[in-house]
Amino acid sequence: MKLVASLLAFAAALAGVGAHAQTPAPIVIKFSHVVAADTPKGKAAERFKQLAEKATGGRVRIDVYPNSQLYKDKEELEALQLGAVQMLAPSLAKFGPLGVREFEVFDLPYIFPNKEALYRVTEGPIGHRLLKKLEAKGITGLAFWHNGFKVMSANKPLHTPADFKGLKMRIQSSKVLDAQMRALGAIPQALVFSEVNQALRSGVVDGTETPPSNFYTQRTHELQRYLTLSNHGYLGYAVIVNKKFWDGLPAEIRAALQGAMTEATRFGNANAQKENEEALEAIRKSGKTAVHVLSEQEKAEWRKALLPVHKEMESRIGKELIVEVYREANAASSR
């Protein structure tokens, strides 16, 4: 009887091994980003996770790491290139320092008069061409995710360019954003996103620029008494993957992931405006930050101060690309 029992146990073990062999471990994609999970980018990443895992029947597992849990701004692109993570959604300003300066066209102040102009660029030939340029850096670009237009904040009112004189303003590491702040008379300070609030507390910087959703979810409204709805610049992201990893995936897995990304992008971009509007309302209700809406005269002063940055950056970004974006913006406005 003992022999029979042993044989049965051995047969069961073999069956278990066979079943295990028929169910290989899922492909794991680490998706790292630097903002909170309840931001437009954070929610789009979670939606992609759900869609991708369903579309691949569990053959792929997406592990999302928000809020700089794995890597900070300055570390994440190198981590992707080395294969330490497989997917990121960095802001477009990150690609200038990487050597793809054309992406800095998105940092130019007031280059997009509205979201329709922006979509014509990101979803059209210009956007596709820019993503293609990342391949030389070992990166495959999958999509553009939007987070809307930026506001300015400080502990003093910012109504006109003269109000910026001498203020230390946090920026991302971008030559365009550096020039933008200098054009306003401010002193630009490049800092990674995760360090902004501490820098505000300690006085390393006096103010910052970001969309309302980031301003609220990072609780920056508890540190800055004044916010101006300047809508002077755009903040967007490119969802990117390690090219070697992506190219090594089975074709059917790539197709399923690309389909999931298309759906997640549609969801995220449609959600971004609502998230920013709700964040702005929450900031107002908090009573901690006074929100200023620029008058027409003030808008004209801001534009007069900032539009020369376009000319200044032509040699860096490329005059032809800037003119091409103007053309798309004009086409969107005339529809």
Image (cartoon, rainbow, N blue to C red):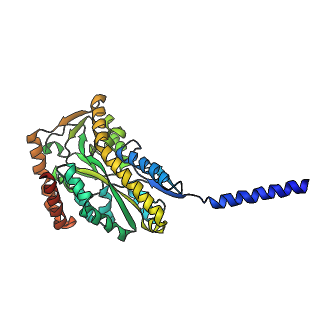
- Asked if residue 330 lies left or right of residue 58, the reply is left
Which residue is nearer to you in this view: 199 or 325? Answer: 325
Residue 105 percent across, percent down from the top left: 22, 59
- Asked if residue 149 lies left or right of residue 139, the reply is left
Which residue is nearer to you in this view: 158 or 259? Answer: 259
- Residue under the image location 75 percent in, 60 percent down: 14
- Residue under the image location 29 percent in, 57 percent down: 93
Residue 279 percent across, percent down from the top left: 31, 37
Q: Is residue 77 visible in the rendered structure shown here?
A: yes
Which residue appears farthest toward the bottom when viewing the image?
Answer: 136
Q: Quadrant of residue 98?
A: bottom left
Q: Quadrant of residue 152?
A: top left
Residue 269 percent across, percent down from the top left: 31, 48
Where 221 falls versus 34 (above or below)? above
- Residue under the image location 24 percent in, 54 percent down: 119
- Residue under the image location 22 percent in, 49 percent down: 115
Which residue appears farthest toward the right when viewing the image?
Answer: 1
Residue 153 percent across, percent down from the top left: 25, 41
Which residue is nearer to you in this view: 203 or 327? Answer: 327
Question: How many labels were placed on the picture?
Answer: 0
Q: Is residue 35 visible in the rendered structure shown here?
A: no
- Asked if residue 253 lies left or right of residue 6, the reply is left
Q: Quadrant of residue 38?
A: top left
Where 52 falls versus 272 (above or below)? below
